[in-house]
Image: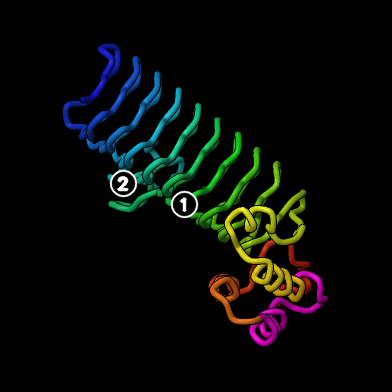
Amino acid sequence: MNKISKLAYVDPDAKLGDNVTIHAFAYIEGNVEIGDNCVIRPNAVIRAGARIGNDCHIYEGSIIAATPQDFRWKGDDSLVIIGDQTVIREHVIINRSIHKDSATKVGHNTFIMAQSHIGHDSTIGDYCVLGNAVKVAGDITIGNYTILSSNALVHERCDVGDWCLIKGGCRVNNHVPPYTVMAHNPIEYKGVNSFVMRKGNMSEQIIDDIASAYRHLYHSNTSAFNALKRIQADVPESPEKDNIIRFMKGHKLQLAALPMDLEG
């Protein structure tokens, strides 16, 4: 049975699952779907186009499916899709897509800390952590198991791969390949994300192979094109190697923390 405060507003057209709790002064518009066992805390705003999965917890002052902050949006209906078991802390803003029937997406089991912002048409993967006051611009993809520490800033159309760690305050101004640690301003490659990968039960051999791949890219004083050839030839076959190569090719070797004259 749902528990809805008499001081909350829930539009009659909103669709609620089972065992949903909506606290006082929450505001739920029409064209909203909220899954089972969700908690919507006081002063949270769930706007039209929100699709929230099961077992989510949305804290005070957050706005889900806020209209896009982009002059290209012409008022078309669009979505924000939130996966299951995701936690959205205080005063987070997630903008919906600027394109008709398209969506901004946040994956399953992701934790978004206070005062973070996710721009239109971005996709946040599963099991991610966004620290306090992280700012993610529009048209970005953040891979699975990636951590953006507090006050990190990701520029528009700059993708971040799986299993990355972006240190606090870092400004991401190009694509970040998977399994890496990035820090400082301007952004610098600091190594592979071995601590978190071990937590994910990756073997030491796989971690060593990933480190070998990135030695070719970041420490061999060659172009990204030549580094890609060396990775293809020298690193043992694995899904992780395939992921690195696919990311490099998919982003045309335009990667963060490469010296300008070595980008290929």
Q: Which residue is mark 2?
A: 78
Q: Quadrant of the N terminus?
A: top left
Image color mode: rainbow
**Which residue extends farthest bottom?**
233
- In reply to whether residue 218 is colored magenta, the answer given is yes
The amino acid beneath tag 1 is Asp
Q: Residue at x 64, y 57 (%)?
A: 198
Q: Nearer the viewer, mark 2 or mark 1?
A: 1
**Nearest to N terminus: mark 2 or mark 1:** 2
Numbered circle sitting on residue 126: 1
The Cα–Cα distance between marks 2 and 1, rounded to whole angstroms, is: 21 Å
Which residue occupies the foreground of this view, 167 or 110? Answer: 110
Q: Label 1 neighbourhood size at 10 Å, few (<14), some (14-19), many (20+)?
A: many
- In reply to whether residue 95 is colored magenta, the answer given is no
Q: Secondary structure at mark 1?
A: loop
Q: Residue at x 60, y 75 (%)?
A: 241
Which residue occupies the foreground of this view, 26 or 205? Answer: 205
Which residue occupies the foreground of this view, 198 or 120? Answer: 198
Whether residue 71 is situated above or below residue 253 in the rendered picture: above
Q: Residue at x 35, y 37 (%)?
A: 55
Q: Which residues are magenta?
A: 217-235
Question: Looking at the image, do the residues carrying marks 2 and 1 touch, with CB atoms under 8 Å apart?
Answer: no
The amino acid beneath tag 2 is Ser
**Which residue extends farthest left?**
12
